Image: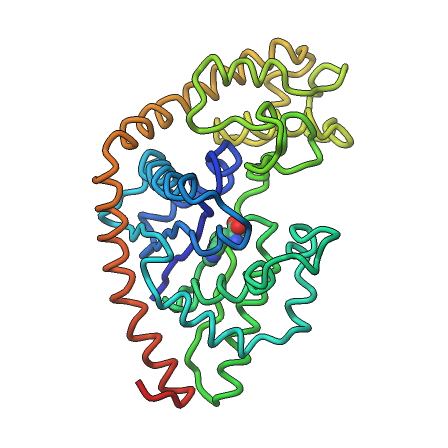
Amino acid sequence: MDRVFSGIQPTGDMHLGNYLGALRNWVRMQTQYECLYCVVDLHAITLWQEPADLSKHILEVTAGLVASGLDPKTNIIFNQSRVSAHAELAWVFNCVARLGWLNRMTQFKDKAGKNRENASVGLYAYPNLMAADILAYKATHVPVGEDQKQHLELARDIAQKFNNDYGVEHFPQPEPVIQGPATRVMSLRDGTKKMSKSDPSEASRITMTDSADDIAQKIRRAKTDMEPLPDSAKGLEARPEAANLIGIYAALSDTSADAVCQKFAGAQFSAFKEALTELAVASLAPIGTKMADLMKNQDYLDEILIDGANRARAIAEPILAETYKIVGLRR
Ligand code: TRP
């Protein structure tokens, strides 16, 4: 049985990068697989979060998932901390994964920065929790962005070492489903940096709750170069900002960068930006409006999360119990 698991952190406003990079693919997968989509609040606290903001962001991300088109009845939408199997299995995996494996994780190095000694132990063990997220459900398919590939490989190594150490065929090898090429959305201010919630410049990202005016203004101000649009995607080499805007247009209209270049060949960026604004507003504004509506009904959002957690628990608990039994724990 194929089962999809993916996670999103509730650490700030959801943006176009989340939408094109993750949510749209999640929506596509919902008709083909049994899907669990998890708001990974335990991952969020590996970096300090203001408690009131965290609480709000958990609901906001839930609203974003639903507003993007995920059906909370067919999918299991829940927040991680409500299902204790994640934290419990993560502990077992803390005892399976080796220090040497975690020392190689590039995201830890990036996030911890120079002050490694002062990073939380949770940030270091983050990939073990991610492995637990996936394997608590024996998920087989994991849609993730390029930046999470290394963590997924670690999850596969953990599954394999667990199976070898205990001489069982308990955990499957989860497959990454790397999302299409146009899905790596970059900062509007710097085409070499990923669009990110943590970028201090708000102008660097389009959030899912931006008004039509905000979207227009951010696209108008987006960094470009002096050249007109090329006639094929080849002409985007070494033009990261141009490539990003054209990639966004291609993703939003479900075509290739090549097709977008052909359509706008020779045009100035000012004209292209107008077309991009129209497209971005048409795609995002309805989702933003729906999110705002859903945020007015927080009880409904909590109901979705509680119901999702109950259904998630029903899958994860027997797998955790079996895991404990394999390890030799009495419970
Ligand atoms: N680490 C992922 C990210 O930052 C989020 C995540 C947590 C995740 N657990 C997961 C993704 C399990 C896929 C599967 O994007």
The image quadrant that residue 224 belongs to is top right
Q: Nearer the viewer, residue 239 or 323?
A: 323
Q: Nearer the viewer, residue 85 or 238?
A: 85
Point 47% across, 34% down: residue: 13
Give percent across and percent down for residue 179: 52, 46
Position of 47 with respect to 23 (left or right) is right
Q: Quadrant of the N terminus?
A: bottom left
Position of 222 with respect to 165 (left or right) is right
Point 58% across, 75% down: residue: 97
How many numbered discs?
Answer: 0
Give percent across and percent down for residue 239: 75, 28
Would residue 141 be visible to someone looking at this image? Answer: yes
Residue 303, placed above or below residue 269: below
Here the colouring is rainbow
Would residue 144 be visible to someone looking at this image? Answer: no
The image quadrant that residue 218 belongs to is top right
Q: Quadrant of the C terminus?
A: bottom left
Point 52% across, 32% down: residue: 251
Q: Nearer the viewer, residue 176 or 13?
A: 13
Give percent across and percent down for residue 83: 32, 62
Q: Nearer the viewer, residue 143 or 50?
A: 50
Point 43% across, 52% down: residue: 40
The image quadrant that residue 268 belongs to is top right
